[in-house]
Image (spheres, rainbow, N blue to C red):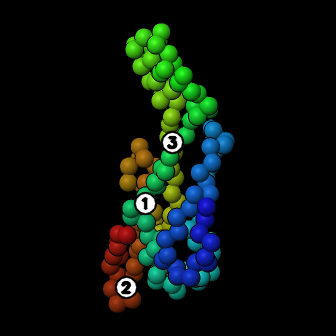
Amino acid sequence: MESLSPISEDDRVVCRSDLAGIHPLENAEMVIKILEHRPSRFKFSSSEALQNFTRATNVRIRLLGTRTLQGHLMHLNDRTDPTVTRRVREQIIWKSLAKYFYSIKEILMGGRCVCNGHAGTCDILDPRRPRTLLCRCSILSSTDTRLEEKEK
């Protein structure tokens, strides 16, 4: 469940569990918009707190509980049946435990280079990882013709 109180500060962390449903099981997509409902969402460039908050360096995804493929409907009545051998009983327990899972196929995080109005580029660091970019802001000084690069 999402927090009921409105977001009053741009850098307030909100923990959500409204996206924790099991359906659909495959090809599901969860979109999380961190600017949504923030006080300065329409004045991003003038809010230092919001800019710092969205400068993600460590993102935590906390998986709160395992899910099952109808595993919660299975019951182990064989535990009390003396005719079931220990080996068979252990196999039944193992099979029921194997139905619990976490599943994340892919995590994508969008971003942008913010160069304060100056020309800038986002360079690919490694061709094998084309989604990993390095922001380079080019600043041309009015008194100097040198091109300086600032890594963000």
Q: Image quarter for residue 77?
A: top right
The kind of residue on which mark 2 rests is Ser
Please state which of residues 99 and 75 is positioned toward the viewer in this rendering: 75
Query: Residue 75's x, y, as percent?
Result: 56, 27
Q: Pinpoint residue 104: horizontal percent, then vertical percent.
A: 51, 43
User: How busy is the neighbourhood of tag 1: few (under 14 within 10 Å), some, or many (20 plus)?
Assistant: few
Residue type beneath disc 1: Val
Residue marked by disc 3: 66
SS at mark 2?
A: loop
- Distance in Å between CA atoms under marks 1 and 3: 20 Å
List the residue tagged with mark 1: 59
- In the foreground, 138 or 33: 33
Q: Earlier in the sequence, mark 2 or mark 3?
A: 3
> Considering only order in the chain, which callout, 1 or 2, is on the residue closer to the N terminus?
1
Q: Which residue matches tag 2? A: 141
> Could one spot residue 92 in this view of the protein?
no
Using the image as rendered, state which of residue 105 and residue 149 is in the foreground.
Answer: 105
* Picture residue at 62% right of the left edge, 43% below the top: 22
* Residue 25 visible (yes or no): yes
Q: Is residue 92 left or right of residue 23?
A: left
Q: Nearer the viewer, residue 12 or 55?
A: 12
CA gap, disc 2 and disc 3:
56 Å
- Judged by depth in the image, the label closer to the viewer, 2 or 1, is 1
At label 3, which amino acid type do we have? Thr
Which element carries disc 1, helix, strand or loop? loop
Q: Which quadrant of the figure has residue 1? A: bottom right
